[in-house]
Amino acid sequence: MSGKKSLMKKTSAASVSGKSQAALMGYEEFLRDLKTRIRTAQVRAALSVNRELVLLYWQIGRDILQRQTQKGWGAKVIDRLSADLRKAFPEMKGFSPRNLKYMRAFAEAWPDEPFVQQVAAQIPWFHNCVLLDKASTAAEREWYIHKTIEHGWSRNVLVLQIESGLYRRQGKAVSNFAQTLPPLQSDLAQQLLKDPYNFDFLTLGDAAHERDLERGLMQHIREFLLELGQGFAFVSSQYHLEIGDQDFFLDLLFYHLKLRCFVVVDLKMTEFKPEYAGKMNFYLSAVDDLLRQPQDHQTLGMILCKGKNKIVVEYALRDTQKPIGVSAFQLGEALPEEYQASLPTIEELEAELNSLPLADEAKKRP
């Protein structure tokens, strides 16, 4: 009898559990949706706070400028104002003399309030401070603001892009995109290419070959992708193609997420030569035939050379039917050979370290 009661209890519990699960059908989906909405609201709130803060700082800077101009207030007023504001609002940060000077410079750089509300306030305050310090013209600052909004750059990435001269390099590659791609695709592809590319994270001597350059880029793939720009997804190095019973290898193969196409990169440790365009044309035809899917756009070619003559490149690409861009690259400065010869080897350094008293003490420790 007790066995039957136990079985009835289990059956009843299973029934309740089943009803409970049935009642909660769709709960996980509901929870995911709520989480997404809450996170979106948090981001919007943070952006709203940032906009209000940047606009407040702009207004403070504008008022300081006006009073210094109209009433003849001197530079010392900023120190006094800083002390009074920090006393009145001890819980708030941002009223240091240095930051008040940034507010004044910010208002001076952007006198148009609608522009501040609609554009400059879309990026964090300290991003704007970086632009005031490192970008020299209003056009350059505005360009970096739009790129920061578009790509979501952190402050460190923004500094890196400014110091690498991205504004002057973006879209400067010599290409035939205008003749080989539809207008929208052509404009976007052109803006993605730089000239020159800055590979200062690599130091290769004059005797280095293309494979040395390729290995160096693969060893620093994060820095390489950052220099290429957003949207490049790495596929392979030395990608193998079998064509007509012959083996061919692409130096680097990428897929660009925004352009929706493969990008073939050919590395050259010499100045550009016209035959490089013919070789790239061959590679692009092969990739379009063997790898390209119906939803993909036409494959792009990038030839990265140690140097180039613009006129020679233009002639080489003029009648080429495949979209190709040619850019130079810059490497970090290698240590002169006379200094390299005087440097100790790794083995010599290890032997020297092992001979130090500190090393002996470290060996004795458990």
Image (cartoon, rainbow, N blue to C red):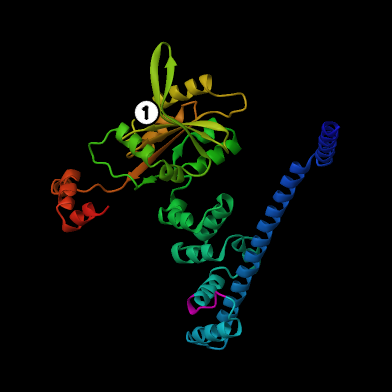
Residue at 61%, 63% in the rendered image: 121
Q: Judge whether residue 310 can be spotted in this image.
A: no
Residue at 38%, 42% in the rendered image: 220
Q: Secondary structure at mark 1?
A: helix
Instruction: Farthest residue to the front: give it.
Output: 1
In the picture provided, is 80 more to the left or to the right than 121? left
Q: Is residue 94 above or below residue 349?
A: below
Give coordinates of residue 259: x percent, y percent.
57, 36
198 or 48: nearer the eye?
48
In the picture provided, is 294 more to the left or to the right than 250? right
Kindly indicate the quadrant of the structure image that contains residue 111: bottom right
Number of other residues with Cα within 10 Å of mark 1, as a class: few under 14, some 14 to 19, many 20 or more: some
Q: Is residue 287 above or below residue 258?
A: above
Predominant SS along the magenta part: loop
Give coordinates of residue 125: x percent, y percent.
56, 66
**Residues in magenta, as a range:** 93-98
Q: Judge whether residue 267 can be spotted in this image.
A: yes
Residue at 30%, 35% in the rendered image: 212
**The magenta stretch spans residue 143:** no
Look at the image and tell me in which quarter the N terminus lies.
top right
Q: Is residue 30 above or below residue 127?
A: above
203 or 23: nearer the eye?
23
Kindly indicate the quadrant of the structure image that contains residue 117: bottom right
In the picture provided, is 171 more to the left or to the right than 124? left
Give coordinates of residue 247: x percent, y percent.
38, 17
Residue at 56%, 75% in the rendered image: 93
Question: Which residue is denoted by mark 1 in the rendering?
Answer: 276
Amino acid identity at mark 1: Tyr
In the picture provided, is 362 more to the left or to the right than 178? left
Give coordinates of residue 15: x percent, y percent.
84, 35
